[in-house]
Amino acid sequence: MSSKNSVNGKTPYGWIYLFLLPTLVLYGVYSLWPVLATLYYSFLDWNGFQVSGVWNGLGNYAELLSDSLFWNSLKATVWFILIVVPLRFFISLFFGILLNWSRLRYRSVFRTLLFIPVVTTSAIVGTIMNMIFDPMKGPFNLLLSQFGLIQGQTHFLGSAETALVTAGCIWVWKWLGTSIIYWIASLQSIPNKLYEAARIDGAGAWTIFKSITAPLLVPFGIIIFVLTLSDAMRVFDLMLTLTGGGPFFRTEVIELFIYRWAFGASVPRLGYASAAATIFGLVFMILTIAQLTIGRRSQLGRGEE
């Protein structure tokens, strides 16, 4: 008797495609079609109110390359990534190791407290943080004034020098719990037998971390780093509620630039915004592929050693 599940000698592959059809339809409608539509709109001069736009070719892209505010948004995005990715990566690694320590009491309580901001909506976080950092009566300014760290009133979210860094620290605090969960899961995948053998040999905590934990965490760390980088490029909702792109466009990341031309302008330019979104998507893909390639090469190099 054949091991294949067959009907009249034929394998019923049609049922497989039938069950996959809902997923394929939803993916095509909500993921694939928006990407293709955005690419098509990027070649149009279209405000969204007309039935169809006017073909503009590469005109939107040429205008973007000469738009100082577009380059400013890319610069703000890059600076934001450089600030938040290392902070979230290493702080979450520290807390992951700490909360995975078997001798730490109330680990579940601390994990819950650190994960609460993740499940809190960005609109609520942005509204509350604007109250906390309010220069007139916000508790953050009052606390720093009492310790003599600042003099007068400092608007951390309203100052061109501090807005991006402050928003970045808030973003790290909000999403720190996600990376902590990743690290804890990675740490728990390391066999305890390796630690027991190292302790029997007399290895200390730092030696165990350097010789066992760190090398085995490298593959997971690459994935977590790529995921953190991906999250850092999708900061629209929190940045919109925190600063709205201000002051003086200092915190207008590329997503806010796209939003401003697509929905915030008095005369929308969906074609122009779509061109910016296309460039943003290409940059995102290049960065992700580069990170994965570097990660694979480093793994192959270690394997050869």
Image: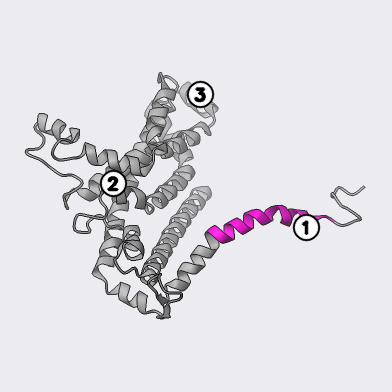
Looking at the image, residue 97 sits to the left or right of residue 252; the answer is right
x, y percent for residue 296: 50, 53
Asked if the stretch drawn in magenta spans residue 85, the answer is no
Residue 117 visible? The answer is: yes
Q: Tell me which label, 3 or 2, sits earlier in the chain.
A: 2
Residues 148 and 19: in front is 19
Q: Residues within 10 Å of mark 3 (few under 14, many from 20)?
A: few
Residues 195 and 228: in front is 228
Q: Residue furthest left?
A: 151
What is the C-alpha distance between the residues marked 1 and 3? 52 Å
Q: Amino acid at mark 2?
A: Gly
Q: Tell me which label, 1 or 2, sits earlier in the chain.
A: 1
| Label 2: which secondary element | helix
| Label 3: which secondary element | helix
Where is mark 3, residue-wise?
196
Q: Which residues are magenta?
A: 11-30
Q: Contact (CB < 8 A) between labels 1 and 2?
A: no
Q: Amino acid at mark 3?
A: Glu
The nearer-to-camera label among 1 and 2 is: 1
Q: Which residue is depicted at the point 40% across and 70% down? A: 49
Q: Residue 14 — which label? A: 1
Residues 39 and 93: in front is 39
